[in-house]
Amino acid sequence: MELLKILASLLGGGLAGAFFNEWLRRRSSRLQSIPLIERVNRRVDPKLEGFTLARVGGSDGRDLEEVKNVREYQFTLRNSSTIHLQDVEIQFEFPTEDIDGWASRPALSKTAPLPVESSLASPWKKGFRWRIPHLPSSDSIEFSFKAVNPPTANYEVALFNADRVVIERSEREPTARRSEHLIPLTRSLLLLLAIIAFMVPITDLLLPGRASELTPVDGADCALTVVSSYEKFVPSSWPFGGPWRITDEVTNIGDQVCPIQSDRLAQTVVLLAPKAAQRKTTYSTFRPKLVAHAFRSGTEQGGATIAVRLYDPVGK
């Protein structure tokens, strides 16, 4: 039985560890999305009377050509995931070839993005691709584009070399919902409760299945012993503990009759003959705990009151 208890403790601890490791594995392997915030996607309009947009041309750079359609794009890529991204590549694709692009340094890492050759899929006409050496969690990077005569305001964006992270386009600053903050907390609490649920039976196994406490009483011409003990009442209840049987016994080891009184052992005065014993049995749902109780021996005129420690029922 003791060997089985030890094995159950080891297996129970290993099972809790396995659940914890599996939870960490699943949490680290799940797909996460990071927002690409579309701050600007609009036609450029001077909005001033007498002004227009024009392009410089000619061999001497003095000729001006009016441009009717210029579109500006401004984006913010924020790493809201728990993953520190390294050497990821981001590609933007647009429906016009007449476009210019720019990328800033990340706000935290300050590692300059490196331009990379891009390959496009129809119907996109031109693309920009950068490799970002380091974009840690909570870092952000800005992108800006100006396109001439794009047929639509549409564009496409994709993230490369990031196995567990994808881009989610957002037209405005995403607001953190309360549930998004509560989900990790709820999962952590559930994990903690699961570990406790496994560890409580194991801890119970490591504690003894029985125990006793002896208190000698010597006073007022009385020689007594008070023994309080407990043991598992239903052995087949292992490994989940209880119920527990508590036995309190006071024995007169002297040579004369001794009056005794106690709130647990004898609530009224009991005359205990020499070599006789007074016993009381109670039961507890959970493992009993030692509690001090008043115990009086001898007559009212010559008696003595001391504190004895008895196992008290728990869970009532």
Image (cartoon, helix red, strand yellow):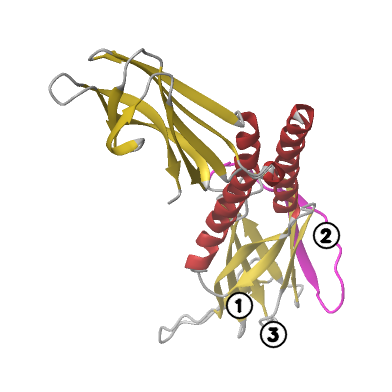
Mark yes or no: residue 273 visible: yes
Residue 103 image point, x, y percent: 63, 55
Q: Amino acid at mark 1?
A: Arg
Closer-to-camera residue (313/252): 252
Residue 137 image point, x, y percent: 59, 48
Answer whether residue 125 is magenta in the image.
yes
Labelled disc at residue 314? none
Determine the image quadrant of residue 34.
Answer: bottom right
**Label 3 secondary element:** loop
**Label 2 secondary element:** loop
Q: Amino acid at mark 2?
A: Ser
Tell me which label, 2 or 3, sits earlier in the chain: 2
Q: Are marks 1 and 3 in contact (CB under 8 Å)?
A: no
Q: Provide the residue designation for mark 1.
A: 71
Determine the image quadrant of residue 16.
Answer: top right
Tell me which label, 1 or 3, sits earlier in the chain: 1
Residue 236 image point, x, y percent: 72, 45
Report how far apart the C-alphas of labels 2 and 3 lie in the structure: 21 Å
State which mark lies toward you, 1 or 3. 3
Q: Main secondary structure of the magenta part?
A: loop
Closer-to-camera residue (253/20): 253
Labelled disc at residue 152? 3
Q: Provide the residue designation for mark 2.
A: 118
From this view, report whether residue 121 is shown above or below residue 238: below
Q: Is residue 87 left or right of residue 226?
A: right
Report how far apart the C-alphas of labels 1 and 3 lie in the structure: 9 Å
Tell me which label, 2 or 1, sits earlier in the chain: 1
Q: Quadrant of the N terminus?
A: top right
